[in-house]
Image: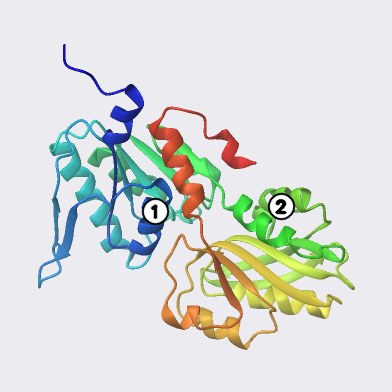
């Protein structure tokens, strides 16, 4: 009788990690952590902008993970993801997990005005209907977005990576700041694990990407403030928040956010602000000017995502990744 491979070897051989073009550096780092080669896939555009996808290896019966944040250019990266899922489905992959280090459209998660779509739900349905069997996401803008999918969603947080970084510092005079009421739960969890106090900024948003800081709930005088958010887009809110904190007596202001959207004048605003440091993850690839900014620091979430992929592949719990 011919010898058979042990079960763990079969699982290892079935694991495939593929990547779109949205964040190739993160994808390669994840593959390095998993000690698996990056899967063969061709993703390119025709001269008129149409996207062409071809899976360049056998994936029949494989457990496939597609790493593709839907960051800018959002529509292009989203369509790359959808076409890759469809190609894998038609190539008889056993299970397809869409790994979304950043989920675009997450800020449009409710109908807050008449005659507007719930875009996050539309995008979730598109990914699901394309053939994804599972979602692995990182710091969704709103946790309830998990409910927009009718397939399993593993929702990770970059907090363990960030907290490890800040714990190496002297935090005896630090206070964590939530930039708005909606981020209080995230900031409170951060403050609890760093064992520092918490304050909240009350703001009023009059229109998209424009925020007016109203007042600070809590005493920040004499403290070094650490603003915690899930993403930073134009950095307008961040800079106004830092000015309000300094005006209230804070000695210094830093910030920490998972997703470096950094659109428009964001990098220039950060560079010219009185912020000491802004820490991001590499869920979104940073533009060269952002990487060149002395106030911006990037921490990798490759190991975190790799451990989650390994756990999902081996059908073990991912709860240890939240510690």
Whichever of labels 2 and 1 marks the residue nearer the N terminus, that label is 1
* C-beta proximity under 8 Å, tags 2 and 1: no
Quadrant of the rendered structure where residue 223 is? bottom right
Residue at the outermost top position: 1
**On the image, numbered disc 1 is attached to which residue?**
32
Q: Position of residue 93 (x, y in %)?
A: 21, 35
Distance between the alpha carbons at the discs numbered 2 and 1: 29 Å
Residue at the outermost bottom position: 272
Indicate the secondary structure of the residue bearing disc 1: helix
**On the image, numbered disc 2 is attached to which residue?**
190
With respect to residue 165, does 156 lie above or below? above
**Dot 2 crowding, Cα within 10 Å, few <14, some 14–19, many 20+:** many
In front of the other: 103 or 28? 28
Q: Position of residue 187 (x, y in %)?
A: 70, 54
* Residue at the spot 18% in from the left edge and 38% down from the top edge: 59
In front of the other: 141 or 215? 141
With respect to residue 291, does 125 lie above or below? above
Is residue 179 among what the camera can see? no
Residue 281 falls left or right of residue 84: right
In front of the other: 124 or 139? 139
Q: Position of residue 295 (x, y in %)?
A: 61, 80
* Residue at the spot 36% in from the left edge and 36% down from the top edge: 134
Query: Of circles 2 and 1, which is in front?
Result: 1
With respect to residue 146, does 244 lie above or below? below
**Dot 1 crowding, Cα within 10 Å, few <14, some 14–19, many 20+:** some
Is residue 241 among what the camera can see? yes
Residue 299 falls left or right of residue 121: right
* Residue at the spot 48% in from the left edge and 28% down from the top edge: 316
């Amino acid at each position: 009788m011919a010898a058979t491979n042990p079960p763990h070897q079969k699982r290892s051989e079935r694991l495939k990690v593929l990547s779109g073009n949205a964040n190739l550096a993160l994808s390669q780092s994840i593959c390095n952590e998993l000690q698996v080669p990056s899967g063969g896939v061709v993703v390119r555009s025709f001269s008129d902008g149409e996207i062409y996808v071809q899976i360049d290896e056998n994936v029949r019966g494989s457990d496939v993970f597609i790493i593709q944040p839907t960051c800018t250019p959002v529509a292009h990266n989203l369509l790359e993801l959808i076409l890759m899922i469809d190609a894998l489905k038609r190539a008889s992959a056993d299970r397809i997990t869409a790994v979304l280090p950043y989920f675009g459209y997450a800020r449009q998660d409710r109908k807050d005005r008449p005659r507007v779509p719930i875009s996050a739900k539309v995008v979730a349905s598109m990914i699901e209907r394309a053939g994804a069997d599972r979602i692995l996401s990182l710091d969704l803008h709103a946790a309830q977005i998990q409910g927009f999918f009718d397939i399993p969603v593993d929702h990770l947080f970059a907090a363990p990576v960030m907290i490890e970084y800040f714990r190496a510092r002297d935090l005896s005079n630090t206070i964590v700041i939530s930039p708005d009421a909606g981020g209080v739960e995230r900031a409170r969890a951060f403050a609890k694990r760093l064992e520092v106090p918490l304050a909240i900024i009350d703001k009023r948003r009059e229109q998209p990407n424009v925020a007016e800081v109203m007042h600070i709930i809590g005493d920040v005088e004499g403290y070094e403030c650490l603003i915690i958010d899930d993403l930073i887009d134009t950095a307008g809110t961040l800079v106004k928040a830092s000015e309000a904190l300094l005006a209230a007596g804070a000695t210094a202001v830093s910030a920490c956010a998972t997703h470096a959207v950094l659109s428009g004048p964001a990098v220039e605003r950060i560079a010219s602000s009185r912020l000491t440091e802004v820490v991001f993850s590499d869920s979104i690839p940073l533009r060269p000017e952002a990487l060149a900014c002395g106030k911006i620091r990037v921490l990798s979430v490759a190991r975190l995502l790799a451990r989650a992929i390994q756990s999902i592949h081996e059908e073990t719990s991912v709860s240890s990744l939240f510690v």
